[in-house]
Amino acid sequence: MAQEVTEIRTPDGMSEMEDEWNGLLADSEENDLFLTSGWMTNWWSNFGSSHELRLIALREDGKLIALAPFILSKRGRVLGWSKLQFLATGPSDHLGIIVRRGHDSAYAAIFKRIEQWKDWDVLELRELWEHGPTLSHLRSAYPTGEMARGASPFVNVSQGYAAFMASLHKNTRHNLVRYWNKMERELHCRFEVGCGPGEAKRCLPLLKELSLRRWDDEGTSPFSQPGVYDFLESSLGQATGERALFHGIWIEDRPIALVLGFRYLDRYLYYIPAYDPAFANFSPGFVLHSKIIQDCTARGITEVDFLRGAENHKFRFNATDRGLVHFRYIRDGPLRRVEAKAREGRFV
């Protein structure tokens, strides 16, 4: 079979591949929202100006069998340093090389093309599923690469809400009922779910406000990062918005806890949570977790994915850690190895 490797280095070239891209993704083992054409194209529109687009497409007898979405980031004018990364690194909680099932030989062809590029110093690929095919083939291709592991918890809710709740510790069940009854009695709260782009327009500004208030002293809100709000606003106004779910606990017209998540196939992706610290003694975030799981099971969703991060509240619901790995490989050469210690530091 004849194979052809091509490179896409323009936004127009990327946009023209949308249907082909998403069809390939659907037949891959890395299928996720964060690897869809719409998510990545919108990331490029918002953040791409300081990077070079480097997509590798592999076709077999004309049919797309693999797509490696990379960007090249450069810094330093005198002693330049270039990093090859995944497109959409940052706001994406899972990334990888997209390969059609049954075509694992495509990884070698992609790594061969990467090695032909002489203008990168470090390959740094983040948010890889620990047991996913991309990481497995990376480790074979670059055995001296460094790895750093992070948590990625999820819960299987395929058994239904009642059975899932029964699997929790009795103290957890008791506290969920107690806190919700207290909120209903003292605050007259309600649980509400908003779906689609229209609700995104209403809820996204409120989520930003809550998040910034929650993290006011620490500055770790995702909305404190430049460009994130604009990226989400534009994403939710496009195809991604059709997958959006805003679960919230509300007092009249204001939420005291709100979560932006996405439905992708039969998974729910718990993306950005926020709650009002003024109501912390009611544990609204904790209660909202159970409300989200209840709503998800009613929608036929079988997995609630809490995405990256090892926060304790995720594991109170018997989550299993899927694991995310960051991979870094410094290109061979004595000068690069010396520079890497100063430029890259400890890998986390």
Image (cartoon, helix red, strand yellow):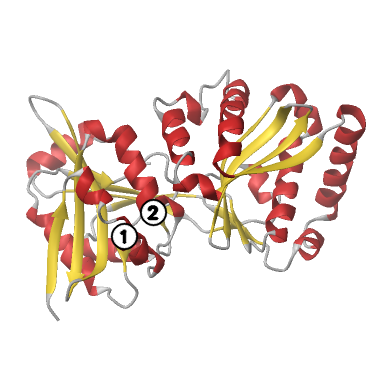
Above or below, comparing residue 318 to residue 180 in the picture:
below
Report how many numbered discs are placed on residues in the image.
Answer: 2
Comparing 245 with 165, the one in front is: 245
- Mark 2: which amino acid? Thr
Whichever of labels 1 and 2 marks the residue nearer the N terminus, that label is 1
Q: x, y percentage for residue 191?
A: 77, 40
Give the position of the N terminus as an image quadrant. bottom left
User: Is residue 264 rendered to the left or right of residue 282?
Assistant: left
Q: In which quarter of the view is residue 170 placed?
A: bottom right
Badge 2: residue crowd in 10 Å (few <14, some 14–19, many ≥20): some
Query: Which residue is at the far bottom?
Result: 1
Give the position of the C terminus as an image quadrant. top left
User: Is residue 82 rendered to the left or right of residue 103?
Assistant: left
Q: x, y percentage for residue 178?
A: 89, 41
Q: x, y percentage for residue 188?
A: 87, 31
Q: In which quarter of the view is residue 138 placed?
A: bottom left
**Which residue position holds label 2?**
36
Does residue 36 appear in the picture of this structure? yes
Comparing 328 with 300, the one in front is: 300
Secondary structure under tag 1 reads helix
**Which residue position holds label 1?**
21
User: Is residue 235 rendered to the left or right of residue 74?
Assistant: right
- Discs 1, 2 touching: Cβ within 8 Å: yes
Secondary structure under tag 2 reads loop
Above or below, comparing residue 158 to residue 239 in the picture:
below
Spatial separation of the CA atoms under disc 1 and disc 2: 7 Å
Q: Residue at x 19, y 65 (%)?
A: 58
- What numbered label is drawn on residue 69? none
- Mark 1: which amino acid? Trp
User: Is residue 166 rendered to the left or right of residue 319?
Assistant: right
